[in-house]
Image (cartoon, helix red, strand yellow):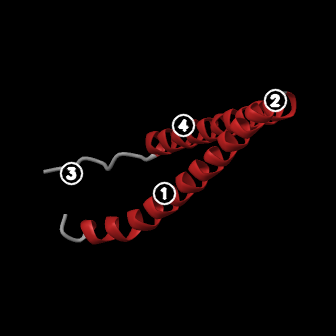
Amino acid sequence: MNRIRPLLGAVMLPLIGATLLQLKFGAQLFTYRIGRAKAARVAGDRGAISIELALAVVALVLIAGVIIVALNTLAKDSADKVKQVPLPAPANT
């Protein structure tokens, strides 16, 4: 267990950093879109920004769907590989 902990730290730190970076980018993009929507509402223009915001939501839903399908496929492939690993023969005593 002592050897695994540094390896997990070395692997998890970049993964967490990459995830947080993407979340920060997504939050900034979302804030930008909301700001544009508020500015359009104040100006009285609701048509173009509503369509743009709807397309952004559709794109996010599609990306989330692709990620879910990829994770499910990966999980099923991994489960199939685990089932295919032969068990060691019992030792005769």
Q: Nearer the viewer, mark 4 or mark 1?
A: 1
Q: Which residue is mark 1?
A: 20
**Three-letter residue code for mark 1:** Leu
Residue assigned mark 4: 76
Viewer-nearest of discs 3 and 1: 1
Which comes before the other along the chain, label 3 or label 2?
Answer: 2
* Secondary structure category for the residue under label 4: helix
Say which of marks 2 and 4 sits in front.
Answer: 2
Q: Are marks 3 and 2 in contact (CB under 8 Å)?
A: no
Query: Mark 3 packing: few (<14 Cα in 10 Å), some, or many (20+)?
Result: few
Q: In screen coordinates, is 56 left or right of 65?
A: right
Q: Position of residue 43 (x, y in %)?
A: 80, 35
Residue 89 image offset from top left, x and y in percent: 30, 48
**Measuring 73% from the left and 42% from the top, which residue is drawn there?**
36
Name which residue type carries label 3: Ala
What residue occupies the far left of the structure in this picture?
A: 93
For mark 2, give the secondary structure: loop
The one nearer the camera, 31 or 81, is 31
Return the disc, 4 or 3, that comes first in the chain's sequence: 4
Callout 1 touching callout 2 (CB < 8 Å) = no
- At 46% from the left edge and 63% from the top edge, which residue is drawn? 17
Dot placed on the residue nearer the N-terminal end, 2 or 4 = 2
Residue 62 visible within the image: no
* Residue underneath mark 2: 44
Residue 43 lies left or right of residue 21; in this view the side is right
Q: Earlier in the sequence, mark 3 or mark 1?
A: 1
Residue found farthest to the right: 48
Q: Is residue 28 visible?
A: yes
Which structural element holds mark 3?
loop
